[in-house]
């Protein structure tokens, strides 16, 4: 399953060169990840209320083409890897069908009380199954 999120590049996100600053892309990735979780059946807040958090353990971003102020991009988000304790999201930023940036983020499923890893399959089996069914093959550009 791919989730598409439309993002309008804001002036405050640009750097001195007039392009979106490199530090903005991880924020956009979080927007896509949050929307993906929502589309998969829970809001991020509901997941946290159930005692599960998803801290980032790894983040990559590959900048291919500049996005500029007022550009309207489509952020594609999908899951490429899933285990009982970890999940990997993949992102593509598209402008008029052209890939502007790609990235990934790896997260662990942890208890919000102890911050220790949890087995999502055991604590939320139905949600884990739904995520398993939505995993895409890894198609990094």
Image: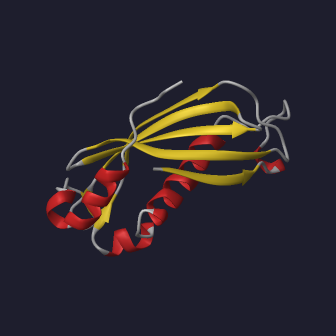
The answer to which image quadrant residue 19 occupies is top right
**Number of callouts:** 0
Q: Position of residue 11 (x, y in %)?
A: 84, 48
Q: Position of residue 64 (x, y in %)?
A: 67, 24
The residue at 36%/45% (across/down) is 135
Image vertical order of residue 47 relative to residue 138, above or below: below
The residue at 42%/62% (across/down) is 40
Q: Which quadrant is home to the C terminus?
A: top right
The answer to which image quadrant residue 113 occupies is bottom left
The answer to which image quadrant residue 119 occupies is bottom left
The residue at 62%/46% (across/down) is 75
Q: Position of residue 7 (x, y in %)?
A: 71, 52
The residue at 67%/31% (across/down) is 99
Image vertical order of residue 77 relative to residue 140, above or below: below
Q: Position of residue 33 (x, y in %)?
A: 49, 53
Could you tell whether 20 is left or right of 78 in the image? right
């Amino acid at each position: 399953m791919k989730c598409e999120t439309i993002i309008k590049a804001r002036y405050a996100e640009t750097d001195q060169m007039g392009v979106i600053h490199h530090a903005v892309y991880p924020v956009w990735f979080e927007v896509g990840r949050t929307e993906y979780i929502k589309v998969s059946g829970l809001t991020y807040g509901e997941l946290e209320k159930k005692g599960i958090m998803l801290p980032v353990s790894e983040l990559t971003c590959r900048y291919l083409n500049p996005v500029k102020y007022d550009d309207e991009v489509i952020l594609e988000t999908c899951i490429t890897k899933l285990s009982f304790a970890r999940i990997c999201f993949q992102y593509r930023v598209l402008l008029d069908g052209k890939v502007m940036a790609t990235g990934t983020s790896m997260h662990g499923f942890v208890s919000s009380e102890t911050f220790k890893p949890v087995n999502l399959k055991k604590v939320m089996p139905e949600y884990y199954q739904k995520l398993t069914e939505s995993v895409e093959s890894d198609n990094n550009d």
